[in-house]
Image: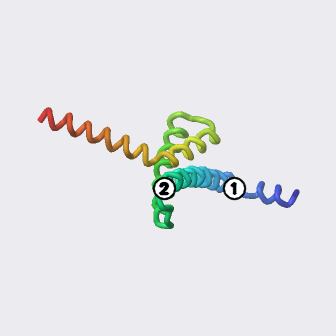
Amino acid sequence: MKIIYSFLRSIPKEVIEVLSFLSAVMIGSGYKMIKKNESGIKITLKRMVVEAFASFFIALVVFAVFTQFLHFNTFFTYMMCSLAGSMDSLIHKKLEAAVDVAFNIYKKKV
């Protein structure tokens, strides 16, 4: 047990934080894949990779906002990254709708 503990203590803190962030994002992406599988969508390797990349970039934005601007706890930030990674399709749809509304308002003014 002391060998494992000494090994974990020797790993730099930054490496542990990166691995924690990636594991939180993968948990969110896995949850999203389970939900899509339950709704009847076929899960392929290509879809898994695409969803993982999309989840990663959404979670990266959430991580930047929560750590740099809001100064939340690291564990809470990772869990919010996981949640955002699992909801990136919903975020994308809402953002697309907001941009559509903005362009329609602009079109009416012109």
Q: Residues within 10 Å of mark 1 (few under 14, many from 20)?
A: few
Q: Identify the residue at horizontal 47%, vertical 57% (top origin).
A: 41
Q: Position of residue 9 (x, y in %)?
A: 77, 54
Q: Identify the residue at horizontal 26%, vertical 37% (top origin).
A: 101
Q: Identify the residue at horizontal 45%, vertical 54% (top origin).
A: 54
The kind of secondary structure element at disc 2 is loop
Q: Amino acid at mark 2?
A: Gly
Q: Amino acid at mark 1?
A: Pro
Q: Position of residue 66 (x, y in %)?
A: 53, 38
Name the residue tied to disc 2. 40
The kind of secondary structure element at disc 1 is loop
Q: Quadrant of residue 73?
A: top right
Q: How far apart in space, not on screen, are marks 1 and 2 (Cα)?
A: 42 Å
Q: Residue furthest bottom?
A: 45
Of marks 1 and 2, which one's residue comes earlier in the chain? 1
Of tags 1 and 2, which is closer to the observer? 2
Name the residue tied to disc 1. 12
The image quadrant where one finds the C terminus is top left
Q: Are marks 1 and 2 in contact (CB under 8 Å)?
A: no
